[in-house]
Amino acid sequence: MKDGSYQIRAMRKEELKKTLEWAAQEGWNPGFDDVEAFWAADPEGFLLVESGGQMVGSGAIVSYGGQFGFMGLFMIKPEYRGRGWGRDLWYYRRQRLQERLERGAAIGLDGVEAMQGFYTAGGFQKSHDHIRYSGRIDDLGAVPSYPQAQLKEPRELDFTTLEAFDRKHFGAPRTEFLKLWLQPKAGRARVLVSAEGEMLALGVIRKAHEGYRIGPLFAADAEAAATVLWDLLAAYQGQEVAMDVPSVCAAAAPLALRFGLKPGFTCARMYYGEPPKRPWQNIFAVTSLELG
């Protein structure tokens, strides 16, 4: 898409890396190595605005198997705002993503308060809030004990089991993304498995530009979530940690508070189309605000 003064085109991998650097400058605090997993999720899912040979804006249009789409990483460099390029990029992204999805598939995004009116005008409706709980990890308290269950590393389980558990909570396939996300270069991933071999919880902590980010944290109940969360945090005492908690999971905020994390930044999960049915009561932290 061109208008003479700018063009919208597909992003290259090195430009996605630059986009995440911008996100860090904006205070979003993405994971330090997120670029590899994000690119694996959908190499065709990232667009940019270019003017005079320079990248001046960005946005994701990630398709998860055509069954669910996500619009994130929407940014225009400050000196290029007010020209209507951001609006053009946003509507172009929505159109392109619709074309890449199955008929009736929903599109999600996480919107800050200042942008929610714009997104509503563009056809998105608010579902609930995501609240970032963060803080310095000092005293973790007693080790939670979940009866007849064992903590394991994801590599100890068959990948199809991991993928099925993730899809149950995320609602769409993200195979290539998950393969990398469950093996963070700087961080750790843990699963809780019952004596019968049933997965009860899954959690990941990864290095961010500032401190560490937790996500996802999926669990059968609050104690299963606490068992995994304690293990994730134990290796990072003294570090700043953050997790993005859905307001619709009643047990999530008390869990974050239990480990000394405090609420701060809030954004809204919004959907274009019929909101997908997800077991929000079992989602204690979303994977990321950038790609869902």
Image (cartoon, rainbow, N blue to C red):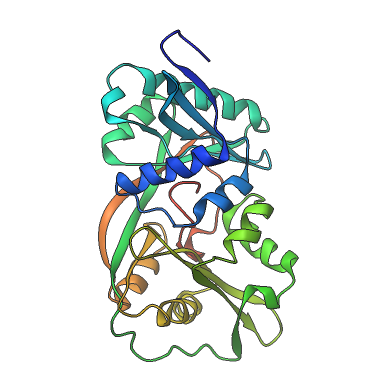
Quick check: can you spot residue 219?
Answer: no
The one nearer the camera, 44 or 90, is 44
Where's residue 169, x and y in %?
58, 59
Residue 212 locus on image (x, y percent): 39, 66
Residue 138 visible within the image = yes
Instruction: Report the residue that reaches farthest toward the front.
Output: 53
Residue at image location 27% in from the left, 40% down from the top: 113
Judge from the rendering whether residue 4 lies leftward or rightward of residue 165; answer left or right: left
Figure quadrant of residue 123 = top left
User: Is the residue 158 above or below the residue 148 in the image?
Assistant: above
Percent x, y of residue 55: 43, 28
Left or right? Give the position of 26 relative to 183. left
Residue in the image at 33% along x and 88% along y: 141
| Quarter-of-image position of residue 162 | bottom right
Q: Is residue 182 left or right of residue 122?
A: right
Say which of 49 and 289 sits in front.
49
Q: Residue at x 55, y 91 (%)?
A: 147
Indicate the position of residue 218 as horizontal and vertical percent values: 53, 66
How many marks do you count on the picture?
0
Q: Is residue 94 left or right of residue 161?
A: left
